[in-house]
Amino acid sequence: MMYARSALWTTLLTLSFVSCAHANTEDEYQDFTNRIGDEVRARDFEALDHEANGYRHDKSRMSDGRWKLAMFYRAVNSALPDIVGSPRRKEEFETDLTQFAKAHPESMNVPLLLAQTAEAVGWKARGNGTADTVTPKGWHEFGQAMDGAAAILDHQRARLVGNPEWYALRMEVAIYRNESQPAIRALFDEGVRREPAYLALYQTMQLNLSPMWNGSNRALMDFVNDAGHRSPAAASEGLYARLVWNASPDYVRIELDPRLDWAAMRDGMDAVVARYPAERNVQKFFLMACSHPDKKEAQKLLAKIHEAPSREILDNNVPIFKLCQDWAAGKIPQFIMRDPDTGEQRLIK
């Protein structure tokens, strides 16, 4: 079943993991998104192209380890719905972007911006509801727009394969077009061979395997166990832990799956926090260690928490997070963890 696009982007943005100890990554990302969005709305394609080139060349990260190149394109995407929602603004934007593309045929970014614009037009036609709410006209226009995005990306493939975001975006379009699983996997494998640490590639593959796109929890766990162990970037990126985190919005309580390799999870959490001790990372992993439960790992992470609970990371788990803090600190010997969504209860001791 095809779900609302807002849910898809929530999944993609949840994980993506330089260093800046105890950085407020919520403000950091919001400021970044606002600035890029302002450049998109101002149609400042020169600035956008220059900035994306820098992120691609430097492979720069945000304080929690997310690639700025991937976050750049996510920020662009966030600004596009308002633009394509207005016929006048859409026409002005597309005209100026097309003219810029003609004047800068060497750009490694402009074709991706063109494809993203086509995507946004398609989602405007489709609407953000579930599949059963989409009209036949909406499906038709959505399909046309995604075919256009694919054509733009495929036409520039030979030149743009040096930009890892090309693979992530082309995989995304392939998901929306219901292309074959072997074709999507081939894109992923090639992208990872070229840039094994580009986290957006793994995130997009997990989107493809998630229940919202006719995948399953089992498929997600299989992918975590495969890529999290075997990828060339697995150890340096703490990839096992990153993939578990990224799967968690779709596969609730994935950390309790009996097939999960908790030793690999612990090593991954330690690797991420060692390189990127941002509060965002520490708080999420602390909650997961508590939920498992792994008191020794939770105590190690507790010592690195220096801010109030992050609503962006914890959502409605803030009360549980506080109980976990008391448990890890030895203030309480045990407690009942009640899932705020399902009501399921487990004893944490």
Image (tube, grey):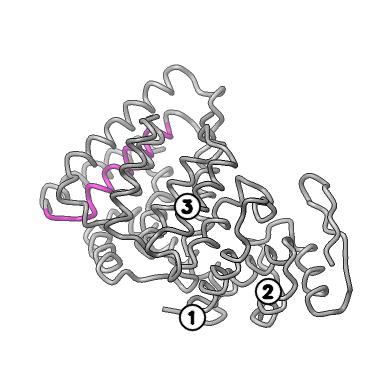
Q: Nearer the viewer, residue 166 or 205?
A: 205
Question: Does residue 306 appear to the left or right of 196 in the view shown?
Answer: right
Q: Quadrant of the N terminus?
A: top right
The CA distance from mark 2 to mark 3 is 24 Å
Q: Which mark is residue 20?
A: 1
Main secondary structure type of the part rendered in magenta: helix
Q: Nearer the viewer, residue 284 or 33?
A: 284
Residue type at mark 2: give it. Glu
Q: Quadrant of the C terminus?
A: bottom right
Q: Position of residue 252 (x, y in %)?
A: 67, 48
Q: Nearer the viewer, residue 328 or 200?
A: 328
Image position of 334 with respect to 124: above or below: below
The CA distance from mark 1 to mark 3 is 30 Å
Give the number of the mark in front: 1 or 3: 3
Q: Residues within 10 Å of mark 1 (few under 14, many from 20)?
A: some
Give the number of the mark in front: 1 or 2: 2
- Residue annotated with mark 3: 226
- Residue annotated with mark 2: 297
Looking at the rendered structure, the secondary structure element under dot 2 is: helix
Magenta stretch bounds: 106-124
Q: Position of residue 76 (x, y in %)?
A: 37, 53
Question: Does residue 320 appear to the left or right of 49 in the view shown?
Answer: right
Q: Nearer the viewer, residue 230 or 47?
A: 230
Q: Residues within 10 Å of mark 2 (few under 14, many from 20)?
A: some
Residue type at mark 3: give it. Asp
